[in-house]
Amino acid sequence: MSALSAPITAAASGDNTVVTGVAGYAIRVIGYVLSFSGATNARWMSGAGGGAVALSGLIYGGASMVEAPGDVGKNGRGWFQTAPGAPLNLNLSAGVAVGGHVLYELAPQT
């Protein structure tokens, strides 16, 4: 399946949906760029709320930019992926504007 992209426009403390889940597919992140307007910690999550699972460690932001290049995606592994049907969320520790984009693909799950 071809790579897709989505803009990141998160500003609320807690879960911010970046890519909506699709039944029967995991969302495999190939690369991303995050730009922080101030101090907050971010973490990629599979799902939301009490059932959410962390996909990354904390990403410490403070008026900075973080990039995870897409090179790892060329070999088909990607950085991480959600559970089947789960949304890809960016969880923020504080209500600070975070922007950027994510490059992903939908990985069929059986």
Image (cartoon, rainbow, N blue to C red):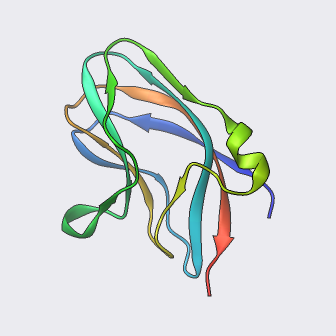
Residue 98: image quadrant is top left
Report the residue at 21% width, 39% height from top: 13
Residue visible at 57% across and 48% down in the picture: 79
Residue at 55%, 26% (x, y): give it. 67
Residue 61 occupies which quadrant of the picture?
top left
- Is 9 on the left or on the right of 103, as rendered? left
Q: Nearer the viewer, residue 66 or 23?
A: 66
Total number of numbered discs in the rendering: 0
Which residue is drawn at the image coordinates 67% and 56% (left, top)? 77
Q: Quadrant of the image for the N terminus?
A: bottom right
Query: Horizontally, is 15 left or right of 78 in the view?
Result: left
Instruction: Please tell me whether residue 37 is drawn above or below residue 106 in the rendered image.
Output: above
Residue 53 x, y percent position in the rendering: 32, 62
Locate residue 5 relative to residue 7 in the image: left or right: right
- Viewed as shown, does residue 39 lie left or right of 63? left
Task: In this rendered view, identify the residue nearer to me: 93 or 96.
Answer: 93
Q: Give whichever of 59, 23 is nearer the camera.
A: 59
Q: Is residue 44 above or below residue 105?
A: above
Q: Is residue 58 above or below residue 15?
A: above
Q: Measured from the top left, where is residue 71 in percent x and y?
A: 73, 38
Residue 22, percent from left and from top: 56, 73
Please, is residue 96 above or below residue 81 in the view?
Answer: above
Residue furthest to the top in view is 63
